[in-house]
Amino acid sequence: MKTTWYEVISEKIPESVAPFRIVQLSDVHDSMFGENHEQVVRKVKMITPHAIFITGDLIDSNRYNLEQSLQLIRALQYVAPLYYVTGNHEIATNDTDHIKEELQLLGVHVLSNEAMVINTLENELIAIGGIEDPLSSVLEEKDAIQLAIQEAFRHVPDTTFKMLLSHRPEHFDLYAENHVDLTFSGHAHGGQFRIPGIGGLIAPGQGWFPKFTSGIYERNDHQMVVSRGLGNSIIPIRLFNQPEIVVVTLFHTKN
C-alpha cells in the first residue's frame, strides 16, 4: 500500500486555513486491511489530516458487506471530519439510503449534490461539494453530472475555492467547465494493470488505455486528483499498481 502526496497552490485557497491537508480514500470495495483495517488506519492517523474524503465504492455490490466497511469508518471517525459520495457500486446495491443512513449515524458528511461551505475566523470561504454517481439518474450520464454540479454549488460564491468529490474521472471536462477548482475522483483503479511508460490498461467508463487513471491532471486553472483506490472489484489482481492512499495539501499563494 502506497501513500502518494500532492500539493495544490492557489490564491483562492484561504490563507487562514492553509496548509490544509486532505486524505483521499477511494474504491475500498469491502476489502479488509488487517484486523479492523489497522494498516489503513495507522497510516491515516500518522498523516494527521484536516479532512478525509471518501470518493465512492466504499462497498462492493458483488460481495456486499456493509458492516465490514463501516469498521473502517468507525476507526477513522474521530481522526478528522469525513466527507463521502456514492460510487456506482453503492447505487448498484439498491441499498443506497441505508448505506447513507449508517454513515450519517457515524458523523460522516454525506454529500448528495450539495456543498458544505467552511467559513474561517477571517470570514474566508472554502467549499467541499459532492455529487451522486450518475448511475442513480434516469438522465444521460453527462447531463446528470452537469445538473448535479450546478445543484451542489448553486449558493457558493464564484470567488470561493471549490472542491468536488465525484467518483468518475472521465468527466474532467465537465468539472473544469463548471469552474471546479479541484476535483477528487477514483473509479479507474489505476487502470488495473499499469504498463511502465504507458500507464493504465483498462478502466470502467474509459475502456482500453484510459486517459485518467492515477495522479493529478490540469486543465487551465482546474485540477483533478485521481486515486488508484484501495480495493478491487471484478478483476482481483493488480500489476505494477499498488493500492493507494492519497494526500493533498492545499497552500495559499498570492499573484
Image (cartoon, rainbow, N blue to C red):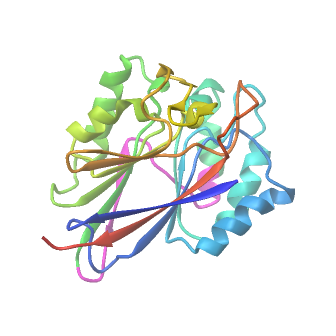
**Residue, far right:** 35
Q: Is residue 234 magenta?
A: no
Out of 116 and 161, give the one closest to the viewer: 161
Horizontal side of 114 relative to 62 (left or right) equals left
Horizontal side of 65 relative to 169 (left or right) equals right
**Residue, far left:** 255
Name the quarter where the C terminus is drawn. bottom left
Residue 127 vs 133, above or below: the answer is below
Residue at image position (37%, 67%) is 250
| Residue 160, picture quadrant | bottom left
Q: Which residues are magenta?
A: 103-122
Q: Position of residue 252 (x, y in %)?
A: 27, 73
Residue at image position (73%, 47%) is 69
Out of 49 and 212, give the one closest to the viewer: 212
**Residue, far front:** 197
Out of 218 and 116, give the one closest to the viewer: 218
Residue at image position (20%, 68%) is 11
Q: Is residue 104 magenta?
A: yes
Q: Position of residue 15 (x, y in %)?
A: 27, 78
